[in-house]
Amino acid sequence: MTVDSSAARKPRRSAAGKAGTTGSSAGTTGTKRTTRTTKKSTDPELVQLLTPEGKRVKNAEYDGYVAGITPDDLRALYRDMVLTRRFDAEATALQRQGELGLWASLLGQEAAQIGSGRALRDDDYVFPTYREHGVAWCRGVDPTNLLGMFRGVNNGGWDPNSNNFHLYTIVIGSQTLHATGYAMGVTKDGADSAVIAYFGDGASSQGDVAEAFTFSAVYNAPVVFFCQNNQWAISEPTEKQSRVPLYQRAQGFGFPGVRVDGNDVLACLAVTKWALERARNGEGPTLVEAYTYRMGAHTTSDDPTRYRGDEERLAWEAKDPILRLRRFLEASNHADDGFFAELETESEALGRRVREAVRAMPDPDHFAIFENVYADGHALVDEERAQFAAYQASFADAEAEGV
Amino acid sequence: MAAETKTMALAKAINESLRRALETDPKVLVMGEDVGKLGGVFRVTDGLQKDFGESRVIDTPLAESGIVGTAIGLALRGYRPVVEIQFDGFVFPAYDQIVTQLAKMHARALGKVKMPVVIRIPYGGGIGAVEHHSESPEALFAHVSGLKVVSPSNASDAYWMMQQAIQSDDPVIYFEPKRRYWDKGEVSTDAIPGPLHKARVVREGTDLTLAAYGPMVKLCQEVADAAAEEGKSLEVLDLRSVSPLDFDSIQASVEKTRRLVVVHEAPVFFGSGAEIAARITERCFYHLEAPVLRVGGYHAPYPPARLEEEYLPGLDRVLDAVDRALAY
């Protein structure tokens, strides 16, 4: 890794203000820091509330944001992650069976997505990439809605305002500007909603992301930039994107950045709540870097064996987000065998429902090509639709004539 | 607003139109580089921030993609942003947001989202500017479905087409003929002159049709005057809209005059004239006495100011094309 190893030991937050939270001085984020100085920079300092072994560790800054969490809440987070993973696995299988043209798996990123997704209020607004299936789940978007574009029957198609969950954006980083503009609108409306923009380590190199940072900072927009650093932008590791840890980018723009263990659902929940609270309090944008790992391929078209080794994946599997919460639930006696068995049944039912829904998804009508190109219509579209209709009708005529 | 007719410059007409939109619809925003205190480099937004405040007339960071990208987000929140790109040649950092997001959002959402965003772009040459300040990139936008592209040629159209563009639920690229900013004309504030995307015959004639939009309409009228002295009767059509193009009006004119010359500042190659020539040839094949001819810029970078007179269509080059068309 080309990053200066000292970079990872710098304070996790920029010097920008972090008013409104307790224990805000940098460097007081728990006892683990002192034990980590000898670690290599690829194992960075990060906010962690739950170790890979499922042990709860105290964190003066962020414990308050999960203080009221109940065993029911913990089981709900676990259920969200398990069902999201099951849905994701089903979609991958459906691609392999030829039912989907493509799938972008979130395997390994469940904690980052569920933790941040469950931190949101209903009136908050989400701007996802194309991999936020877990966040969509949290927003109540029917998972089968996500599959239309991957099956090729539409390019998204859900109503973003039904669940305050914007359409999947495929061009990398574009949505961070939409989120910023939306957040500027929230401020103009005098609302206390917040906006969250998802993007990845690769997107951090995009000019649009830098411009979103600039605009949100200048206008003090209530937006949380939630970067899932899953270590790989298709085949390129994060050090091909940045010379500094990504969360440090925020400093130059004048707002705080923090790195959180992206495989720790509790930490993701707490840190996102903190960032959303800043937004609601008029303190402007925050960058959250969720340090995680894309356990699968970039998409079903990708072949990660060409650029990374099994040992890396195995190391991350030991930090699996679902496994660690299960260990915690079991050790705390918050969940019994009945819970896990019931969830298994629910999982399979979800997989079945998704499978059946996808297979039943009809191809769109041919004339859908011309629909919704414009809201107010366009003469050329009308003309070409008519030409297309005449052309289609010519086949019917030919059939009628027995040609 | 009391109905009245005033004489004003084209730039002032846009200013008055923006003012009216800001007054009548609290969701309308004006945003761009230097649009606030300065009033824009051409003063088109002069005085608007003073009267409507920084929250509605927004000086943005100097980043065109950011301007359009945040305008998209504001539109998603229910606002109707009118953004200014300072000069034609500076639009390209925003081209990605315009093409991949703004133009396609309505279709991507299967109609559940609308994108009422107006992008104002001062365009065209003839003002002796440095590089990137004189270009005519309208074809690059007309080629993209989901966008509408218009260009007024006079103060009245500038006023009303801006009203209509802001009311449109589709994104509209509004090309302002910067060399005509100071041309004065009558503007009546109580009567919409006609639909946004309809062409207008600005001079009737019988021998040949000149079709143009934006800055070239005035030139074509001058050409028609000159031709009249030689006994030639030219019809001048102000297309007003590049996407959609009003082919019905062009067809009607060509069926009468049987000859068509299209004039634009943009390069001829793959320009809007090429599309007009192809479709009018298809529609009017048996009416045409001559091939559709085009006069425009060359397939070369917009030249330094001391050469622009040679690059831009001028009176003589258009007359030459008229002569060639009439010689068939």
Image (cartoon, grey):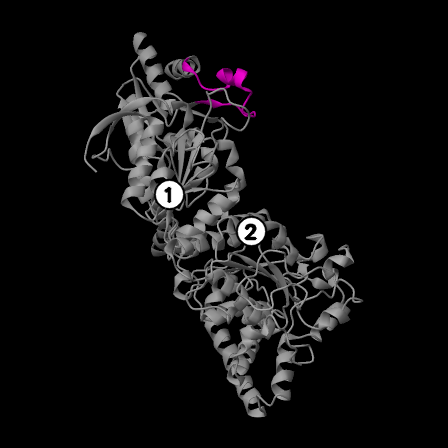
Question: Residues in magenta?
Answer: B295-315
Residue type at mark 1: give it: Gly
Rendered image quadrant of residue B23:
top left
**Image check: B156 left or right of B151?**
left
Badge 1 density bin: few <14, some 14–19, many ≥20, Cα 10 Å: few
Q: Disc 2 and disc 1: Cα gap in Å?
A: 24 Å
What residue is pinned by disc 1? Answer: B53
Q: Quadrant of the C terminus of chain B?
A: top left
Rendered image quadrant of residue A112:
bottom right
Residue B58 magenta-drawn? no
**SS state under label 2:** helix
Q: Residue drawn 53% across and 51% down?
A: A217
Visible residue check, residue A94 = no
- Of circles 2 and 1, the one toward us is 1
* Disc 2: host chain: A
Front residue of B146 and A396: B146
Front residue of A279 and A210: A279
Q: Residue drawn 31% across and 44% down?
A: B167
Q: Quadrant of the N terminus of chain B?
A: top left
User: Is B70 above or below relative to B323?
Assistant: below
Badge 2 density bin: few <14, some 14–19, many ≥20, Cα 10 Å: many
